[in-house]
């Protein structure tokens, strides 16, 4: 939650190890209007460089780490709201064009994939 009370949406994913919670979409960072760049905040737990049982925070700009961090982030508030419609499994990636041409036109549906471990069952 920002200083203005805004709740930032996040993307949650796993990779080979650990969990990542990334603020998405990117937002303007910096305190000088002429020098702002777009970036994000990422919270991680269980990665090779921080496998101590804590959540860690880091800032990224233009896809690269800034070297700046707010450190341990275990006490960052988490918010949730129900999806207007739950995710349903509709097929496999190899069927995507067929699915879009059939019962799931891209003009009416949002798509998600579940891959690479998805340690939290996240789509």
Image (tube, helix red, strand yellow):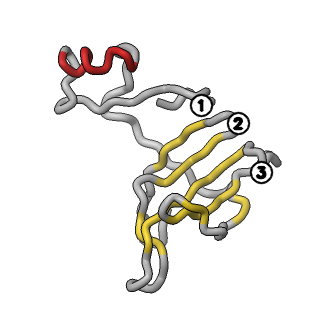
In the rendered image, residue 43, in percent from the top left (x then y), is placed at 62, 53
Of residues 61 and 22, the one nearer the viewer is 61
Q: Is residue 29 above or below residue 31?
A: above
Of residues 65 and 103, the one nearer the viewer is 65
Q: Residues within 10 Å of mark 3 (few under 14, many from 20)?
A: few
Of residues 70 and 66, the one nearer the viewer is 66
In the rendered image, residue 9, in percent from the top left (x then y), is placed at 43, 51
Q: Residues within 10 Å of mark 1 (few under 14, many from 20)?
A: few
- Label 2 close to label 3 by CB (< 8 Å): no
The quarter of the displayed image where residue 95 is located: top left
Residue at image mark 3: 50
Residue at image mark 1: 120
In the rendered image, residue 40, in percent from the top left (x then y), is placed at 50, 60
At x 49%, y 54%, the residue is: 23
The quarter of the displayed image where residue 109 is located: top left
* Label 1 vs 2, first from the N-terminus: 2
Does residue 89 appear in this view?
A: no
Quote the CA–CA distance across marks 1 and 2.
12 Å
The quarter of the displayed image where residue 77 is located: bottom right
Which residue is situated farthest in the right direction here?
A: 52
- Label 1 close to label 2 by CB (< 8 Å): no
At x 66%, y 49%, the residue is: 44
Quote the CA–CA distance across marks 3 and 1.
19 Å
* Label 2 vs 3, first from the N-terminus: 2
In the image, 98: left or right of 64? left
In the rendered image, residue 17, in percent from the top left (x then y), is placed at 70, 36
Which mark is on residue 17? 2
Q: Secondary structure at mark 2?
A: loop
Does residue 1 appear in this view?
A: yes
In the image, 63: left or right of 66? left
Which of pointers 3 and 1 indicates the residue nearer the eye? 3
């Amino acid at each position: 939650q920002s200083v203005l009370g805004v709740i930032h949406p996040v993307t949650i994913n796993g990779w080979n190890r650990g969990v990542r919670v990334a603020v998405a979409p990117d937002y303007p960072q910096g305190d000088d209007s002429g020098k702002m760049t777009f970036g994000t905040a990422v919270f991680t737990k269980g990665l090779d460089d921080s496998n101590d049982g804590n959540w860690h925070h880091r800032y990224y700009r233009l896809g690269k780490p800034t070297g700046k961090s707010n450190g341990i982030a275990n006490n960052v508030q988490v918010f949730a709201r129900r999806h207007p419609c739950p995710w349903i499994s509709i097929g496999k990636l190899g069927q995507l064009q067929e699915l879009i041409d059939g019962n799931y036109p891209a003009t009416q549906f949002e798509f998600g994939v579940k891959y690479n471990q998805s340690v939290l069952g996240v789509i």
